[in-house]
Amino acid sequence: MMKPLFTALIAAGATMALSVTVQAETDGEAIFNQACMACHMTGAAGAPIKGDSEAWEPRIEKGIDTLYEHSINGFNAMPPKGGNMSLSDEEVQAAVDFMVKAAE
Ligand code: HEC
């Protein structure tokens, strides 16, 4: 029952990732400050803290597409789009890029 929807979401995510490389203008830091900081600066609910390389390493190993997918659709206590459904997929991905870069 869930499978076709899941596949469609992955496909949509892949298309988005492609369009992002073409026009990577979105300000990930601004989106992070607005939508992600509340949990990802404090570690609330077990969120990996921005800049904490140890916390991010095993996540980065999953691959950036998985991180995009989990940020957009949610992952355990991580709410879809950080609970801010007005964000576009590109904006969420830019915020992920910002956090991943900070952890490298
Ligand atoms: C309500 C708190 C909360 C907010 C707001 C939030 N996150 Fe998270 N996030 C979490 C938690 C908790 C986890 C850890 C989930 C786990 O590993 O079980 C997480 C994990 C993640 C991960 C790692 C996923 C993985 O597969 O390991 C990424 C990437 C992420 N968040 C991105 C974002 C982005 C981008 C935003 C802003 C748009 C955001 N988060 C906003 C709580 C939050």
Image: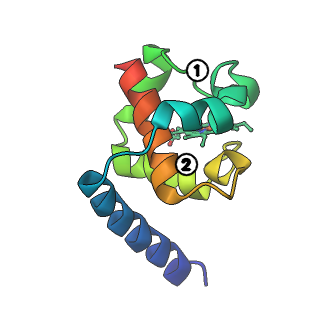
Quadrant where the N terminus sits is: bottom right
Q: For residue 89, which numbered disc appears in the image?
A: none
Question: x and y percent of residue 31 in the render?
Answer: 57, 38
Q: Residue at x 67, y 58 (%)?
A: 86
Q: Is residue 97 above or below residue 15?
A: above
Q: Are marks 2 and 1 in contact (CB under 8 Å)?
A: no
Is any atom of residue 58 visible in this view? no
Residue 52 or residue 29, whichever sits in front:
29
Callout 2: CB less than 8 Å from ligand 1: yes
Callout 1: CB less than 8 Å from ligand 1: no
Q: Secondary structure at mark 2?
A: helix
Q: For residue 71, which numbered disc appears in the image?
A: 2
| Apparent side of residue 61 relative to residue 91 in the rendered image (left or right) | left
Q: Residue at x 24, y 56 (%)?
A: 22
Q: In this view, which residue lies farthest toward the left? A: 22
Q: Residues within 10 Å of mark 1 (few under 14, many from 20)?
A: many
Q: Residue at x 31, y 62 (%)?
A: 19
Ligand 1 shows up in which quadrant of the image?
top right
Residue 51 or residue 28, whichever sits in front:
28
For badge 2, the amino acid type reads: Ser
Q: Residue 94's image quarter?
A: top left
Question: x and y percent of residue 44 in the render?
Answer: 74, 25
The colour scheme is: rainbow
Residue 56 or residue 28, whichever sits in front:
28
Quadrant where the C terminus sits is: top left
Residue on which disc 1 sits: 49
Is any atom of residue 35 visible in this view? yes
Q: Is residue 47 above or below residue 53?
A: below
For badge 1, the amino acid type reads: Ile
Q: Earlier in the sequence, mark 2 or mark 1?
A: 1
